[in-house]
Image (spheres, rainbow, N blue to C red):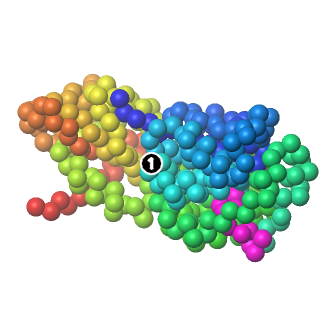
Amino acid sequence: MARVTPIVFLPGAAGRASFWQPVADRLADLGPVHLVGYPGFGGLPPDPGIRSLDDLYHRVVAGLPPGPCHVVAQSMGGVLAVRMAAERPERVSRLILVATSGGVDVARLAAEDWRRDDRASLPDVPTWFADDRTDLSDRLGAIRARTLLLWTDTDPVSPPSVARHLARLIPDARIEIVPGGTHSVASERPDEVAALIRAHLAAGTAGDLGQYWKRVARGRDFRIQAVAGGGRDQAIGLARDAISASRGDILDFKMFSNLSLCLIVEVAGERVPALAGALAALGWGVEVDPAPEVLAGRAGEPLQGTVQLTFPEGDGRLEIPTPAVPG
């Protein structure tokens, strides 16, 4: 069964898991969603073992689903997420930071001090969160996850200057601005925010294209090309179902504009012809290289290869060149 990467949502200082519910509902088709709440925040009972942001960090990491996750974090949650991405890169597949300090000193970036107002509006939360002065500036360069910095242009607590500063320090980061939002833009405008997160989770970037092709080259045992019928999203779902039915695993994927999707797949040799047959049974045009009988002869071997889908609603077929493989 192919593993689907979970999406973990971390709230801000209010600590309410429900903050992210509207966005999570709109992304639930992408995989399991996990809404995190903080003990002692948002109406949850306090935990005497959590007396600092460091304690909370370790509790959050311990509660993550197994394997890598996509991490979406708001405000104070962004400090936890940045540390996680820097210290535990194997646990963070992609990172989305929303209106956060990211663990840097935002006072010198023209941000308003949030502590007094937050203490007045959240009188029941632990005092240590306002006293915390975690500085992660020297760790931001260690973040390997592709990062989306999702900001608004009218938030005095975390203005765009903070996003620009983080973008300079995080190696593979880009900024998206939602005009006219507040510090709580994620819960107030979930349609826009969810659409930006969805695009970030689906898209590739030029920065990691070289690494992607290296993985394709390593997985050169087979290549399946299919011209998919019907709508794009439905076609992708059907392809994933066929891979799962063949007991295959999706190791990675890349979307190239709206015309083509390339999946890197691992599947037993004798099941590759069945996978190709399942795609052909959908009425799609399918080509397999090498010949199915050659692949069937490698029974029991875990083979890696690519499944490339092209979508007829695009302007013609988008050809993606096979990477050169030395020797």
Closest to the observer, 227 or 173: 173
Q: Secondary structure at mark 1?
A: loop
Closest to the observer, 271 or 9: 9
- Name the residue type under label 1: Asn
x then y, percent, for residue 83:
58, 57
- Among all residues in the image, which is located at the extreme front? 48
**Position of the N terminus by quadrant:** top left
Closest to the observer, 116 or 27: 116
The residue positioned 50% from the left and 50% from the top of the image is 92
The residue positioned 72% from the left and 38% from the top of the image is 47
x then y, percent, for residue 59:
61, 43
x then y, percent, for residue 165:
64, 71
Report which quarter residue 151 is drawn in: bottom right
Report which quarter residue 139 is drawn in: bottom right
The residue positioned 65% from the left and 53% from the top of the image is 54
Residue on which disc 1 sits: 258
* Residue 100 placement, left or right of 200: right
Closest to the observer, 133 or 224: 133
* Residue 71 placement, left or right of 150: left
Does the magenta portion include 106?
Answer: yes
The residue positioned 49% from the left and 53% from the top of the image is 88
x then y, percent, for residue 281:
27, 24
- For label 1, count other residues whose C-alpha is less than 10 Å away and answer few (under 14), some (14-19) or many (20+): few
Taking the image as drawn, is residue 312 in sight? yes
* Residue 236 placement, left or right of 159: left
Question: What secondary structure is the magenta-colored segment mainly?
Answer: loop
Magenta part of the chain: 100-109
Does the magenta portion include 205?
Answer: no
- Among all residues in the image, which is located at the extreme right? 120
* Residue 173 placement, left or right of 286: right
Report which quarter residue 309 is drawn in: top left
Taking the image as drawn, is residue 150 in sight? no
